[in-house]
Image (spheres, rainbow, N blue to C red):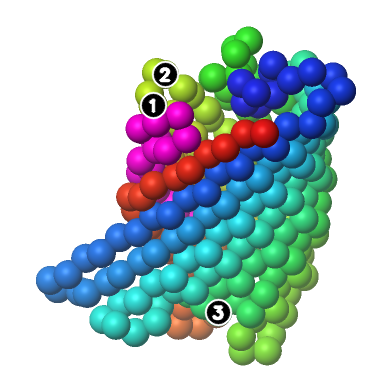
């Protein structure tokens, strides 16, 4: 929960927007360019309800050939009271890197804040959602599975620095050898009230991918973010 959520009045609605643009460029042995833009809108109503909407688009070339064209969108409505959380999930994804034409997800499940301070500046939270997932690959094949989605969330703010980290472990049920692991960490250095420099680390592993596709993907990027609350 953010500091704004803790200070919110029971009859109010708060909109919190963050936009981020990051990139990376490497040359020498391998010429590589990467550009990522992420946007998040969190709608909070009263003291217990929220609707975060997030979207990310990544475009990357290696040796001047298209390598990455990734799109994700997630809606995660939640109810919280004290340390208890209840989440819903709706997701959409496309991935040139992993040969995914498109993937859709729906799910729900509980969560618990293991630690949170009164100002909402520090939090450790755990959640576990049950997800139904349908993936349609670029070769015409498709897979529909049920997954358990375990998430560990860390959030820490100190003066000008904010660290946020989300780690997911998502095994298919009952075949746990089919799993996905992802980890997203962002360190933000606030320059002004609304502008910050972001350092982002993003890793994803899928145990089952199309032949010829890499099961691992890791990006380290630097960029700027803009935040506004109304």
Q: Which mark is residue 158?
A: 2
Q: Main secondary structure of the magenta part?
A: strand
Q: Indicate left or right for 136 with 21 as reference.
A: right
Q: Indicate left or right for 114 with 96 as reference.
A: right
Q: Assess whether mark 1 and mark 3 are in contact (beta carbons under 8 angstroms).
A: no
The region drawn magenta spans 187-204
For the point 70% across and 78% down, the residue is 136
**Residue 98: where, in percent of width, then height?**
52, 74
**Residue 89: where, in percent of width, then height?**
77, 50
Is disc 3 placed on a helix, strand or loop?
loop
Q: Which mark is residue 124?
A: none
**Residue 175: where, in percent of width, then height?**
70, 60
Crowding near the residue tagged with mark 1, few <14, some 14–19, many ≥20 C-alpha atoms within 10 Å: some
Q: Which residue is mark 3?
A: 99
Q: Indicate left or right for 75 with 192 as reference.
A: right
Q: Is residue 64 above or below residue 18?
A: below
Crowding near the residue tagged with mark 2, few <14, some 14–19, many ≥20 C-alpha atoms within 10 Å: few
| View extreme (right): residue | 11
* Quadrant holding the C terminus: top right
Q: Which residue is mark 1?
A: 161
Q: Is residue 136 visible?
A: yes
Q: Is residue 59 above or below residue 41?
A: below
User: Nearer the viewer's eye, disc 2 or disc 3?
Assistant: 2
**Residue 85: where, in percent of width, then height?**
77, 29
**Quarter of the view holding residue 36:** bottom left
Alpha carbon of mark 1 to alpha carbon of mark 2: how far?
5 Å
User: Nearer the viewer's eye, disc 3 or disc 1?
Assistant: 1
Is disc 2 placed on a helix, strand or loop?
strand
Q: Assess whether mark 2 and mark 1 are in contact (beta carbons under 8 angstroms).
A: yes
Of labels 2 and 3, earlier in sequence is 3
Q: Is residue 53 inside the magenta stretch?
A: no
Q: Indicate left or right for 127 with 203 as reference.
A: right
């Amino acid at each position: 929960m953010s500091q704004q959520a803790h200070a919110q009045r029971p009859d109010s609605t708060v909109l919190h927007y963050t936009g981020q643009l990051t990139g990376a460029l490497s040359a020498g042995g391998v010429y590589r360019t990467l550009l990522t833009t992420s946007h998040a809108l969190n709608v909070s109503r009263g003291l217990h309800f929220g609707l975060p909407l997030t979207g990310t688009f990544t475009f990357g070339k290696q040796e001047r050939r298209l390598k990455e064209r990734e799109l994700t969108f997630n809606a995660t409505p939640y109810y919280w009271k004290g340390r208890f959380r209840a989440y819903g999930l709706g997701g959409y994804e496309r991935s040139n890197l992993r040969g995914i034409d498109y993937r859709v997800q729906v799910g729900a499940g509980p969560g618990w804040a293991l630690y949170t301070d009164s100002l909402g500046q520090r939090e450790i939270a755990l959640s576990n959602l049950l997800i139904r997932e349908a993936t349609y690959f670029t070769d015409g094949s498709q897979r529909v599975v049920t997954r358990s989605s375990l998430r560990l969330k860390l959030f820490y703010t100190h003066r000008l620095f904010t660290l946020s980290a989300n780690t997911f472990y998502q095994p298919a049920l009952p075949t746990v050898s089919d799993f996905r692991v992802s980890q997203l960490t962002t360190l933000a250095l606030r320059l002004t009230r609304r502008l910050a420099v972001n350092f982002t680390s993003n890793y994803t592993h899928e145990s089952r991918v199309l032949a010829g596709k890499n099961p691992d993907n890791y990006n380290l990027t630097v960029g700027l973010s803009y935040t506004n609350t109304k």
